[in-house]
Image (spheres, helix red, strand yellow):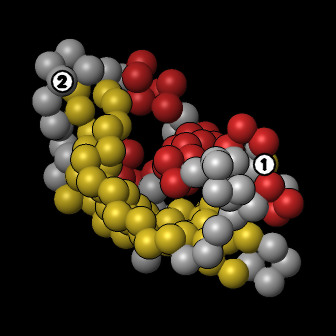
Amino acid sequence: MYSIFETEVTVRPDDIDMNNHVHFSRYLDYILMARYDQMKKDYKVSMEEFVARGFSWVASEVRIQYKRPILLGDRTVKVRTQLEEFDGARALVNFWIVKGENEKAAALGQVQYTMISMKSGRPTPVPDDIVEKYRI
């Protein structure tokens, strides 16, 4: 029902841990970077627009399956995301982090985001006009 969008992320030397691969916490950074990029580029609703309307998104649940390491020599990875569903204040987003020309999955999973009112800090239903803009 929803489109898959892609963002290329550069693997930086400071992403590498003592095991000579990207530290597990950086995968979250890659996903966040891709979502911000795709909100503006693909959905045409930047995070700044959400904030101007008094809304923000928080990650309320994250599930990641690590499939293979990302190494410094990989230089870039592609982060693909796809909205699975909206449910009230919640948006469930699938993601795939792929590497190399063969595009093998380095990680995959889901992030559950919750829309909150910046005034109250409480969950608030995603407005209908935002749901419509995400139907691409």
Circle 2: residue type: Gly
| Nearer to us in this view, 90 or 24 | 24
| Nearer to us in this view, 96 or 124 | 96
Q: Which mark is residue 121?
A: 2
Measured in 3D between alpha carbons, the distance from the residue under mark 2 to the one under mark 1, in whole angstroms, is 33 Å
Relative to 88, 38 lies left or right: right
Name the residue located 25 percent from the left edge and 47 percent from the top edge.
60
Name the residue located 18 percent from the left edge and 24 percent from the top edge.
121
Quarter the N terminus occupies: bottom left
Q: Secondary structure at mark 1?
A: strand
Q: Secondary structure at mark 2?
A: loop
Q: Position of residue 124 (x, y in %)?
A: 17, 37
Circle 1: residue type: Thr
Asked if residue 110 shows in the view, the reply is yes
Q: Residue furthest front?
A: 18
Q: Residue furthest top?
A: 119
Q: Which residue is mark 1?
A: 10
| Nearer to us in this view, 65 or 101 | 65
Q: Are marks 2 and 1 in contact (CB under 8 Å)?
A: no
Asked if residue 44 shows in the view, the reply is no
Relative to 75, 95 lies left or right: left
Report crowding for label 2: few under 14, some 14 to 19, many 20 or more residues within 10 A (C-alpha): few
Q: Position of residue 100 (x, y in %)?
A: 81, 73
Q: Position of residue 107 (x, y in %)?
A: 54, 70
Q: Is residue 28 above or below residue 66?
A: above
Relative to 21, 119 lies left or right: left
First in sequence: mark 2 vs mark 1: 1
Name the residue located 41 percent from the left edge and 29 percent from the top edge.
50
